[in-house]
Structure formats: structure tokens, C-alpha cells
Image: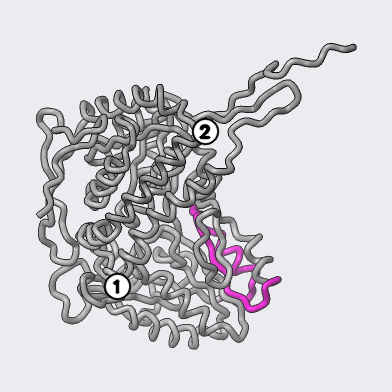
Amino acid sequence: MRDYTKFYIGGEWVEPAAGAKTLDVINPATEESAGKIAMGGKADVDKAVAAAKQAFASFGRSSREDRLELLGAIMGEYQKRQDDIARAITEEMGAPSWLATSAQAAMGMAHFNTAMEVLKRYTFEEPRGTTVIAKEPIGVCGFITPWNWPINQMACKIAPALAVGCTIVLKPSEVAPFSAYLLAEVLDAAGVPKGVFNLVNGDGPTVGSAISSHPDVDMVSFTGSTRAGIAVAQDAAPTVKRVHQELGGKSPNILVDDDGFGEAVSRGISGVMMNSGQSCNAPTRMFVPAARMEEAKTVAAKTAEGWAPGDPNGNSRMGPVVSETQWDKIQGLIQKGIEEGAELVTGGTGRPDGLDKGYYVKPTVFANVTNDMTIAREEIFGPVVSILGYDDLDIAIEQGNDTPYGLAAYVQAKDLGTARDIARKLRAGQVNINGAGVDFTAPFGGYKQSGNGREWGDHAFAEFLETKAILGFEQKQAAE
């Protein structure tokens, strides 16, 4: 049982303010408590923000060399704890061990490494005649992060913020907070100056709202649902702080009629099943030529059934979803798909056979889905794929864009020219062609209700910088 009932504020582990309650953190594979955390309040946020504001006075003026040294130290400490972090992620949100190790925990190291490489060459001052355009750290940053890729979402904010000289107050998800505590231990061991990084646990309406509305927080970065993102923006509005958001998605995956079709179907299904469908950029809407729907169903069923859920500490490819709340939501949407007439190819409601405990969901595929069905419109956030047929590629692209979201999109086509043409027409912040691998320097963020701003690589730096024009910085040469 983990006991994480202190907060990290001003470089120390401190007791929460008087009256703080505790919350049991549930292991989704066992449905039993794996530990407890303290639930903070406004007083804890005020203390953390004050520490971050005080630290910014010096850290905001630190040198590039000092921050490079700090990032290097963080990476060294992170490497020592990476296996611990992977185990914590499995325990708190159910990622199978192979995924927690090779992707979930590994993403943290990748983001710190990327920030370090960008910092080495980033231009903070640019002369333009007698004027200098300077980019300076924005100040105190409030981060509110989710449970589905916990370390990834923390690191992709913390790394660039530290790299440019900002200070931080973090509220991780109360559903999956263990990895955040381990990350705080990493930062402490690496020698992050007191007050530069602070952690306060709690829920969104209390601690999250206190952070996003705080007058001494200069910007807030939120990752989560569109509904919660709207609340964050509303809280932030009276103080006119910068708001960065990475929100929901309902990503289209458009497959072209060519000889790579079967492989493309299988890749698309696996792209959803990984992490039990709990990825905001998962390719959950698969568009296939109507004439090849039967083939798509056969390949999709075989692929999905190869992602059998089971104990995340064993050899299972798929673990449970994160909570009972999520399980109930997913079950309701699967049932909705059945009621609205979508063809259930595999999976369905209820737990998988042989699993009577844990929040496990059957890998589910629907075929002959129409664009007006609920399962084609709402973000399910579970291992559920909707296959839609098309007779005209332009209509598939139009329907792919017919969503309030625009985080990611996918294209599968043997002819690269065709794939590029489709990619240019899709309204999404990131488009993946033919299963391209992760690029940590590529900007990540969405169009429309999928958010605003960008994370990852040099684009992330811009979120944490203010632009200052200093006129007359250089004086004109006197005429001879």
C-alpha cells in the first residue's frame, strides 16, 4: 500500500493544510485500494503558487547552461527510477507491463531528452535592425494532467517549461497519481531549485480550479476532456492568463483501396487496442471502401481478438480500463451502438470470459457504422473501433472532418502522393501516414474542440514564452 499523503512544495514534502481528506487509489486490475493520497485545497495551491512565484525571480533569469545541466541531472535520476515508474503506472491505471515499460515510462525520458536538444540551439533573442525581439519565460505555470498517459503528459509540459526558465505547480490526476510522486522524487534528487517544481494533489473542481483561476499563475496547461477544458478556460478568463489545452479526439483513419488494405486494417485496429483504447489520438473511426467491408470485418475481428485482456502484470497485451466510471461509460456506448443498428463484429458488453474482477473491456469492433451514430460521434475512450464504408474518397474525407474534434487523423495508402493529398485535406493537428513512428520534435495538439496550442519539440517552448520587443537596443551609427 502506497501512502502519498504529503505534497511537494518549496523543495520539501509537506503536510496538507488542515482539514484535507484522503482518497483511496484503486488498482483497476484488482478493484482494490493500492494506496492513498491527500486531497488538497485552495490553501495548498496558494502555498505552492507562492513558492513558485518566489523561485521564478531567480530561475527565470537562469542561464541556458544552468538549465541544460539541470535537464541532464533529471535524465540521470529518471533513468534510475524508470522501472519504478513503469510499475507504478501499471498499478495506478492498468497499463500492461510491456507497455508501461517500453512506452508509458519511456516517454518521460524522451521528452526531457528532446527539451534538452531543443534548448541547445533555441534562439531567445533576435536582432532586427535597432530592435531586439526577446523571448522570455512566461512565469508560474499551472499544469493539470490526466491519467491515461500520466508520465507522458507531465513530462511533455514540465520538460520544456523548465528548459525555458518557468516554475511549476502540478496537479496530476487523482485517479492515477503514483507516477507523479515518483517524478517529484526524481526532480528533487536531481537538484531542481526549491520552489521551481511543486505538486499538489486533489480533484479538478477544487485544486484544478484553484490553479486555473489563481491570479499569480501566468499560464495554465490542461490535458483532458473537452468538457473539463471549457471549465479551465472559464476559470482562467477573469485573470486573462494564457490557456493551453490538449483535449478530446475522434480520429478518422482513411484506408485507400489498394493491395495494402489488409495490413492497414490490422494496423488501425491495433492502434486503438493499445492502451485499452485510452488514447485521445486513437484512430477510432476507420473508413474503408464499401466494396471491401467484408474483408475489413474479417481482418478486424482476427486482429481485435488477438488483443485479449488480462492481468497487466503478466504477459497480457491489454490491461483493464482505468476505473469503474470509465468501464460503465464504455459499456453504455457499446450498448448504444448495438441499439442504433451498428453491426457488432466482435466483442460487446460485459467482461471478457474468465475475468470476473477488474475493469476489463472486450476488444470491440462495429462495422457498417453510419456517420450519425453515437459511436461515430462521441469519444468512447475504450477499445472500440467503428468501421464506416464509403463509395467516394472525397465523401470519406468530408465525413472524416465532420466532427467537433481535430486532434489526429490517419491515412493508409500505398501511393504516397495519394496519401499526402488526403493528409492535406484532413482538419487535424497531426496526420499519420502509413503507420509512421513517433516524432518527439513534431508538434502535438488539435484543431477545433481538440484544444489550442501545441506540445512537443520546439513548438512546446513557445507555449511557455512571452515575446518582448526592445526598441533602440542597438543605436544607429552616426553619419560620417
Q: Quadrant of residue 232?
A: top left
Q: Which residues are magenta?
A: 390-417
Res 331 seen here: yes
Q: Residue at x 18, y 66 (%)?
A: 29
Position above or below: 345 against 53: below
User: In screen coordinates, is 356 left or right of 458?
Assistant: left
The location of residue 76, given as percent across then percent down, is: 35, 51
Mark earlier in primary sequence (2, 1): 1
Position above or below: 264 against 159: below
Q: Which residue is mark 2?
A: 465
Q: 99 or 193: which is nearer to us?
A: 193
Residue density around tag 2, few if under 14, some if 14–19, many if 20 or more, within 10 Å: many
The location of residue 296, given as percent across then percent down, is: 48, 83
Tell me the kind of residue under disc 1: Met
Res 379 seen here: no
Taking the magenta stretch, the answer to whether it contains residue 363 is: no
Q: Residue at x 9, y 55 (%)?
A: 1
